[in-house]
Image: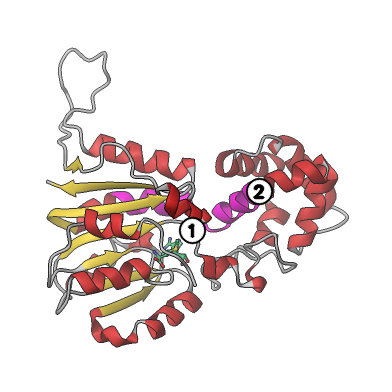
Amino acid sequence: MHISVLLHEVIDGLQLQPNTNVVDATLGYGGHTQLALDNIAPHGKVIAFERDLRTMRATQERLKAYGDRLICIHGSYAELRERAEEIRKHGPIHAIMADLGLSSLQLDQEQRGFSFRFQSPLDMRFDETQQRTAATLLRDSDERTLQNIFTRYGDVPFARRLSQRIVQERSTHPLHTTSDLIMCVESCVGKRIADKHMAQIFQSVRIAVNDELAQLEAFLPASIASVESGGRIAIISFHSGEDRMVKRFFEEEATDCVCPPEFPECRCTHRARIWKVTKKPIEPSEIEIHTNPRARSAKLRIVEKK
Ligand SMILES: C[S@@+](CC[C@H](N)C(=O)[O-])C[C@H]1O[C@@H](n2cnc3c(N)ncnc32)[C@H](O)[C@@H]1O
C-alpha cells in the first residue's frame, strides 16, 4: 500500500472535467491516477509515466477495471516532449500532475536498497534496466562529487568528512550493501549522529543514482509546452532542491519580463505563459501528516497555462 499525498488537493486543484485527458508523470501505486480517472469519466484517459517497470505492472493490474482509459508508458517523465505526439494520439492533454520521489511500495521492497531498514544490495534504481546503481555511484564518484551529492541532495552537515571516509574505505572494502554504507557512516561520525542523518544520506544517494533533478529540469518546460491552454499542472515535491527548482521555474514562466533589474527598459521577448493558481505551496494538514508521516515535507504547486 502507498497512501497518496495531498490527493484531493491535487485532483480538486486541477479542476478536472468529464472526458478530458490527464498525464500522470509519476504513476506509482496509482492513487492520483485512480481519482483522476473517476473525475474524467466516462471517456477521459490518463496517460501515465512510470520509470519502475515492476511498479507499473502492479498498478496496471490493480487498475485493470479502467480498461483502455489508463495508458501506461514505461519511461521517465523527462521524455514528455519526445513522446508528446504519441500521447496526443489519445487527444489533447488537459492537465498534468507529478508526485515526485519514491513510493512506499519501493521503500518496502527489501531487495531494492532504498531503505536503510533492510540489509540489501546498494541498488536504488527506479529503472532497473539502468546501469548505474548506488554501489557503482559510490565506487566511481570522486570525493568532490560525493560531497556535492550529500550536500545538495541531503543537506548532510558532515558531507565532506563522509565523502573522504567513503573514498578511504572503498579502497579496501568496496561498499556493496546497505549495511556497508551504514557502517561506513557510523565509523565516520558515530552511531548517534549517523542514525539522525541516515535518511538524508540514503535520500541523497537515491536522487543522484536516478539523476532526479535533471529529470525534473527537462520535464518542467515540456509540461507547459504539452498542456492545452487553460489546462493545469500540479507538482508535489518532497525535497528543498526540487521545490526550489519548481518554484523558480514557475515564477519565471509567470512573469512577462525577465530582464536584469538594472536594465532601464525591457529588452527581452519573454512573455508569461502561465499564471500561478497557488501563490504559496499547499502543504499537508496536521491530520494528513499524522496518518501519513511521509507527507511531512510535501509541497504542492499548481499553475494554469494562459
Ligand atoms: C511518490 S510516487 C507516486 C505515487 C502516486 N502518485 C500514487 O498516488 O500512488 C513516485 C513514483 O514516480 C516514479 N518516478 C520517479 N521518477 C520518475 C521519472 N523520472 N519518470 C517517471 N516516473 C518516475 C517512482 O518510481 C514512483 O513510483
Start-end of magenta stretch: 199-220
Q: Is residue 67 left or right of residue 131?
A: left
Residue 214 shows in this picture: no
Residue 46 higher or lower than 261, as above or below: below
> How far apart are the two marked residues, 1 and 2, measured between alpha carbons?
25 Å
The residue type indicated by label 2 comes to: Ile
Residue 140 is covered by the magenta coloring: no
Residue placed at 76% from the left, 36% from the top? 161
Q: Nearer the viewer, residue 119 or 77?
A: 119
Q: Is residue 70 left or right of residue 144?
A: left
Q: Would you identify the image quadrant in which residue 118 lies?
A: bottom right
Label 1 crowding class (10 Å Cα cut-off): few <14, some 14-19, many 20+?
few
In this figure, which residue is indicated by the disc labeled 2? 201
Per the image, label 1 sits on a secondary structure element best described as helix
Q: Which residue is farthest right?
A: 172
Residue 108 higher or lower than 219, as above or below: below
Label 2 crowding class (10 Å Cα cut-off): few <14, some 14-19, many 20+?
many
Residue placed at 21% from the left, 37% from the top? 254
Q: How many marks?
A: 2
Residue placed at 14% from the left, 72% from the top? 91
| Percent coordinates x, y for residue 97 in the rendering | 30, 59
Q: Would you identify the image quadrant in which residue 57 lies?
A: bottom left
Residue 137 higher or lower than 17, as above or below: above
Q: Is residue 218 left or right of residue 202?
A: left
Residue 44 shows in this picture: yes
Q: Nearer the viewer, mark 1 or mark 2?
A: 1
| Percent coordinates x, y for residue 89 in the rendering | 17, 75
**Upstream in sequence: badge 1 or badge 2:** 2
In this figure, which residue is indicated by the disc labeled 1? 291
Which quarter holds ligand 1? Answer: bottom left
Q: Nearer the viewer, residue 280 or 186?
A: 280
